[in-house]
Amino acid sequence: MFSTALSTMAILPSILRNPRTPRAISRSVVPTHGHSFFRVAIAAAAVVTTLVAPNILLGHGFEGDRFFPPTIQTDDPFGTDELSLPMVTMFNNPAADGTPKTRETDISTEFDKEIFPGFALGISDAFTVLNPKGAPSVTGWDNISLSAKYQIWEVPAHEFIFSAGVLWEIGGSGRYSMVNNYSTVSPTLYFGKGFGDLPDSANFLKPFAITGTLSQDIPVRSLNPNVLEVGIALEYSLLYLEQHVKDTGMARPFRDMIPLVEIAIQTPENRGGGPTTGTINPGVLWEGRYCQIGAEAVIPMNRQTGPNIGVVFNVQIYIDDIFPQIFGHPLFGGGSKNFTTGPNP
C-alpha cells in the first residue's frame, strides 16, 4: 500500500548521496539477484500448494448481500484468495535534507491464499523506480512482506465483518541500499460495515459501506520509531444500488462501478519519528466478472507528505472465478466462509 512510498521518503536522502551504501534508517546488506530467485520460488510454491485443495466452488468478499471490493490503499477484511497484479503508484516525494524532489513509481503485486475457512496467508512485493530531479535514477525491489489474516466475527444480516492479522516485512530481502535492513512486524485489525440494514426510508443510503484498518508498525531490533497506521475507505456501491435497492436502469459500465474515498494516515509515535503524514484518495472501482480495475488520485494531507497530487492504478484478478477448481476454497477444513461468487454475473 501507500506506506511503501512514505517509507521510501524517509530514506531517500541517503540513497541519493550514495546509492551503494546501506541507508541509515533502513536498507539491506544483501544484493538483489539472489532474491529474484527467492521471489519466483515463493510465488511458484504458493500456486502449487493450491493444487491439493478440495474441489469446492465458493467465492470471496461478501457479507449478506454486500460485496466488499478489495480497496487500493487500505486492505480489505477478508481472508480469502486474492491476486493483485499489478498496482502502480506514481507520486512526487518532497525535497528534504538537501535532496531534490523525487518522482517515485512503485509497481507492486500481492497474492493471498485461504488456508482454513476465513484464514489466509499472503505474500507481497514492489519494484520501485526513483527519479530525483537532476540526479541518476535508482531502481530495485522492496522488501518482501508476508501476512496472515483471520475473519473473527461476521454478522451477514448487518453486513458486518471484523478480522485480525499480522504483516511481517522481511528486512534485507530487497535490493542492497534500497530496503530496510531490519524487519517490521505490524499487528492489524480490520473491519467492514455495509448500510443495507438501514430502514427503507433511507433507501439511497443503503449502498454506502465503510471499511478500515488499524495497525501498529513495530521495528525489530531497530532504533526507528513505532508507527500507527490508520486506513479508512468510504464506498458507494452502484452495484448494490441496482441489485438490492432499486434498478434505476443505469447503463453499463456505470452500474458496475463503486465510487470511493480512502484515507491513509501514518503517525510516528516515538524515537524522533517526525510528523504525521497521509493522503486522501478519491477514486472509482469497476467490477467485472473476472477482475476489478481501479484508479485513485493520491492527494497529500500536508507538505511533509508531498508537494503534488499523485495517482494509483490497480487490477485485482478474481482468480476464484477464473480457476474455480483451484481457488475460492480453503486448502483445509471444508468450505470457505466467503460463500458467494462474483459480483457481476
Image: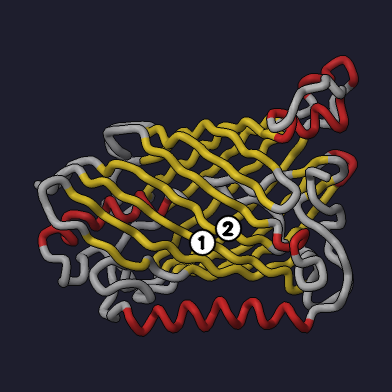
- The vertical placement of 256 against 269, above or below, is above
Tell me the residue that label 2 is attached to.
84
Residue 264 in the image: above or below residue 341: above
Q: Is residue 31 left or right of residue 85?
A: left
Q: Secondary structure at mark 2?
A: strand
Q: Earlier in the sequence, mark 2 or mark 1?
A: 2
Q: Secondary structure at mark 1?
A: strand
- Amino acid under label 2? Ser
- Expressed as whole percent of the image width and height from the top left, the position of residue 150 reads 71, 63
Looking at numbered disc 1 in the image, what kind of residue is underneath it? Thr
**On residue 341, which mark appears?**
none
Q: Quadrant of residue 327?
A: bottom right
Q: Nearer the viewer, residue 86 or 14?
A: 86
Along the horizontal axis of the image, is 334 left or right of 142? right
Instruction: Name the residue carrying label 1.
Output: 109
Expressed as whole percent of the image width and height from the top left, the position of residue 53 reads 80, 79
Please report the residue visible at 71 percent of the width from the left and 45 percent of the height from the top. 288
> Residue lying furthest front in this view?
252
